[in-house]
Amino acid sequence: MDKQKDFYQLEKDIQDIYRQIQILTENEDEAAAVEIKKGRAAIAQKWEKLAPVLTPLHYVQIARHPQRPYTLDYLNALVENFVEFHGDRRAGDDTAIVAGFGFYKGKTTAFIGHQKGRTTRNRIMRNFGQPNPEGYRKALRVMKLAEKFGYPVVTLIDTPGAYPGIQAEERGQAEAIAFNLKEIANLRVPVINIVIGEGGSGGALAIGVGDELIMLQYSFYSVISPEGCAAILWNDQDAMSQVTENLHFLPEDLKKFNIVDTIISEPAGGAH
C-alpha cells in the first residue's frame, strides 16, 4: 500500500464530507440533521483508518494546513473584548505577532501569539508568521504589563521560526530572543504556552517559556525546522521523511521526555 497516496486520498474524502456538512448546516430541518450525523460518522470511520498510518511528516503537513485555526481565530472564538497592542516602543510594530488583553471566562488575561495569513497579501503582511525583533519586544512589553497588574499570560505558538533576514539580525534578532527567555523565566504571574500548529526553533521558544506547556494533538515543537535540519545535517532537502522521524518533535514524544504537560485532542482530520 502506498501510504502517502492513501493519506492524501483519505484526506480528500474527509474534506469532501466536511464541505457537504457545511452546506447541510445551512438547513435547520430534521433531514439535514440526520445527514450531518451520518457525515460525522463517516469522517470518524475514515480517520480511524488513516490515523495508524500517519508519519511525523504527515503531522508536519497537518500542523501547516492552510485552513488550520490561527491565533486570531482562537481569540475571536474564545476571548471577549480583545484589545490588541501595537509597537515595541523602540523601532516599530511586527504584525507576525499579535499581543494584547482580553477577557477569558470573565478574567482579564494577556494573549500573545504568532499570526500567519490566509491570502497572499495577508501572508506577506504577516511575514508568514516569522517574527522580527520588534515582535518579540512587543510580546515582552505586554507580558511585563500583565505582570505589573497581576494578569496571567497565555501564548499561542505557530511559527516556522524567527525571520532570518539580514535586517532582522542587524536589529538584534538573537538578542531579542535571548532577552525574552531570561525575562519570561522570571515573570511573577502564571504563563501558559500552547502550541497550536508548528513550533519552530528559537522563534517559537521566544514566547514559549512558561509554567505549563500544552500542545494540540497534531502540532509539533522542534529545535529546528525540518527543512533547516535536512539542509544542515543531511545536505538534502529530499530527506524530510528521515529528518522528521529523527527529530522526535511530536506531542507524544515530548510527553515521554516530560517536556509537554498536556496534549489536547483534535477532531478527526485535525483542528481545521
Image (tube, grey):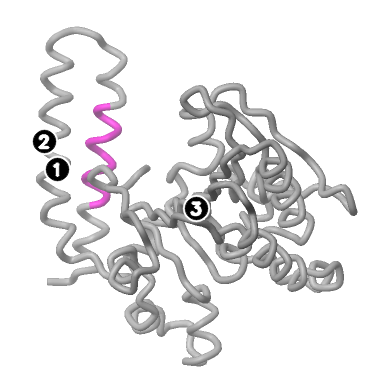
Around disc 3, counting alpha carbons within 10 Å, would you say few (fewer than 14), some (14 to 19), or many (20 or more)? many
The amino acid type, in three-letter code, at marker 2 is Ala
Question: What residue sits 68% from the left and 29% below the top?
Answer: 83
The amino acid type, in three-letter code, at marker 3 is Asn
Which label is found at residue 193? 3
Residue lying farthest to the right in this orientation:
90
Side (left or right) of 2 relative to 73: left
Side (left or right) of 92 relative to 31: right
Question: What residue sits 64% from the left and 49% below the top?
Answer: 123
Question: What kind of element bears circle 3?
Answer: strand
Q: Which residues are magenta?
A: 11-21
Which label is found at residue 266? none
Residue 115 visible in the snapshot: no
Would you name the residue on which mark 2 appears?
41
Question: What kind of element bears circle 2?
Answer: helix
The amino acid type, in three-letter code, at marker 1 is Ala
Q: Quadrant of residue 80?
A: top right
Question: What residue sits 33% from the left and 54% below the top?
Answer: 262
For the residues labelled 2 and 1, the Cα–Cα distance comes to 5 Å
Around disc 2, counting alpha carbons within 10 Å, would you say few (fewer than 14), some (14 to 19), or many (20 or more)? few
